[in-house]
Image: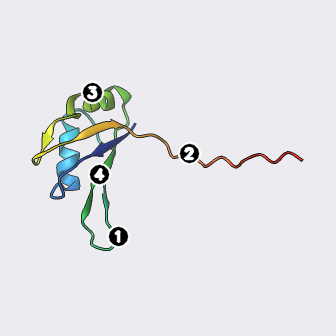
């Protein structure tokens, strides 16, 4: 399951983020979103956990927890959806 983590401190690293989630189970990957110009963290990232039970426990256990001085928000990531094209009827 892909998990969105928001409101991360700029100093939080991918290693820190992965370690938080590993206490709840196996982490497949962890990715901080970085500014392409400065390389600094944008304050959010994604964590992938293959087992739904572990992912749900991590979401419940980590949402609103203080990490590096910031109260993080953790939830299931929503899949990107394509913008629907209006149908043309003639």
Judging by the rendered image, the residue that carries numbered circle 4 is: 44
The residue at 40%/40% (across/down) is: 77
The residue at 32%/32% (across/down) is: 55
In whole angstroms, how far apart are the C-alphas of marks 2 and 3?
26 Å
Mark sitting earlier along the chain (1/2):
1
- Assign a secondary structure to mark 3: helix
Judging by the rendered image, the residue that carries numbered circle 3 is: 57
In whole angstroms, how far apart are the C-alphas of marks 1 and 3?
32 Å
* Quadrant of image for the N terminus: top left
Residue 46 percent location from the top left of the image: 33, 47
- Assign a secondary structure to mark 2: loop
In whole angstroms, how far apart are the C-alphas of marks 3 and 4?
20 Å
Judging by the rendered image, the residue that carries numbered circle 1 is: 36
Q: Report the mark closest to the observer, 2 or 3.
A: 2
Q: Quadrant of residue 39?
A: bottom left
In whole angstroms, how far apart are the C-alphas of marks 4 and 2?
20 Å
Mark sitting earlier along the chain (4/2):
4
């Amino acid at each position: 399951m892909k998990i969105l983590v928001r409101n991360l401190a700029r100093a939080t690293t991918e290693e820190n983020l992965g370690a938080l989630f590993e206490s709840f189970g196996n982490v497949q990957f962890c990715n901080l979103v970085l500014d392409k110009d400065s390389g600094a963290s944008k304050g959010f990232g994604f964590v992938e956990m293959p087992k739904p039970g572990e992912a749900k426990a991590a979401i419940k256990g980590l949402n609103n927890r203080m990490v590096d001085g910031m109260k993080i928000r953790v939830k299931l990531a929503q899949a990107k959806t394509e913008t629907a094209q209006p149908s043309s009827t003639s």
